[in-house]
Amino acid sequence: MGPTASGKTALSLEWAAALDAEIVSVDSALVYRGMDIGAAKPSLQERAGIAHHMLDLRDPWQPYSAADYAADARAAMDAIAARGRMPLLVGGTGLYFKALLEGLSDMPAADAEVRQALSARAATSGWSSLHGELARIDPVAAARIHATDAQRIQRALEVHRISGRTLTEWQGQRPARRRFPFRVLKLVLAPGDRSELHRRIELRFDAMLRDGFLEEVVALRAHPQVHAHPSPMELPALRAVGYRQALEHLDGMCDAATFRERGIHATRQLAKRQLTWLRGQRDARWFDPATDGAGLATARRLFVPASG
């Protein structure tokens, strides 16, 4: 586990080879096809010889929920275990980890008509206005959802419109628990110095630009299914960090330098949110990739069965 740009991919490839493991991605952007550079998806060369799961499951215009993820990832883990190998969970999407390891409260399914109505309102009055409405209906949810987080604002208002109950009320229900048949060791990879994480984020974003990130977004936007969508930036996939800023740049809303600044800033904000969630994982062990090499080597031995 860890924030974006903390070095999870490189470490997971090393560990998977050493442990004869298969990697199960826990990343909400990597489930989408065609989102490779901007989502920092492991390359085909990196994946060579190491099985990866939960990548390229949907096209960017297709829905995919945390509940879908939990079911698919659990099936992948069961299949890996049946082959006598170890599933290695790797990623930074807290909701996906929660859905898989703890389960989710039952909530109303998505309603396309309600979502379209909310998107139409946002197009005229802005998401900050809808966030204000959410603050009146469900102040607890509004306090933890940023005023620019369109996807989460929309979902919280959608749940209330469909059910008459707030998102906070739904989430307060205890999810139906079933025994999780794996021993889970949680390791957090995160630079101890926040400025180092910011430096890594900036370096990686510039590398993405050199590798053709904007060209990737141009190709995504040109796809008939995306082009025909009334508001492509409202697609959950294209609201991912970096992609939204790239679309705004391509639509002439900012120049290249401003796009770079906004993309890096949005990525840093994502890392901040991820770190906040990770601090709530009381049973996790934290490691700095720059200084805790010996500790990580010791931790890796915890994954080797005693009989091995």
Image: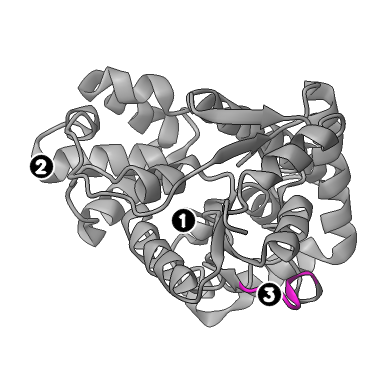
The alpha-carbon separation of the residues under discs 1 and 2 comes to: 22 Å
The residue identified by callout 3 is 219
The alpha-carbon separation of the residues under discs 3 and 1 comes to: 17 Å
Q: Secondary structure at mark 3?
A: helix
Q: Is residue 83 above or below residue 103?
A: below
Mark 3 or 1, closer to the camera: 1
Prevailing secondary structure class for the magenta stretch in the rendered image: loop
Q: Earlier in the sequence, mark 3 or mark 1?
A: 3
Q: Disc 2 marks which amino acid?
A: Ser
Q: Is residue 1 magenta?
A: no
Q: Residue at x 85, y 57 (%)?
A: 209
The residue identified by callout 2 is 163
Q: Earlier in the sequence, mark 1 or mark 2?
A: 2
Q: Earlier in the sequence, mark 3 or mark 2?
A: 2
Q: Secondary structure at mark 2?
A: helix
Q: Is residue 270 visible?
A: yes
Q: Is residue 256 visible?
A: no
Answer left or right for 2 relative to 32.
Answer: right
Q: Disc 1 marks which amino acid?
A: Pro
- Could you classify mark 1 by the number of other residues whose Cα lies within 10 Å: few (under 14), some (14-19), or many (20 or more)? some
Q: Which residues are magenta?
A: 46-51
Q: Secondary structure at mark 1?
A: loop
Answer left or right for 25 relative to 280.
Answer: right
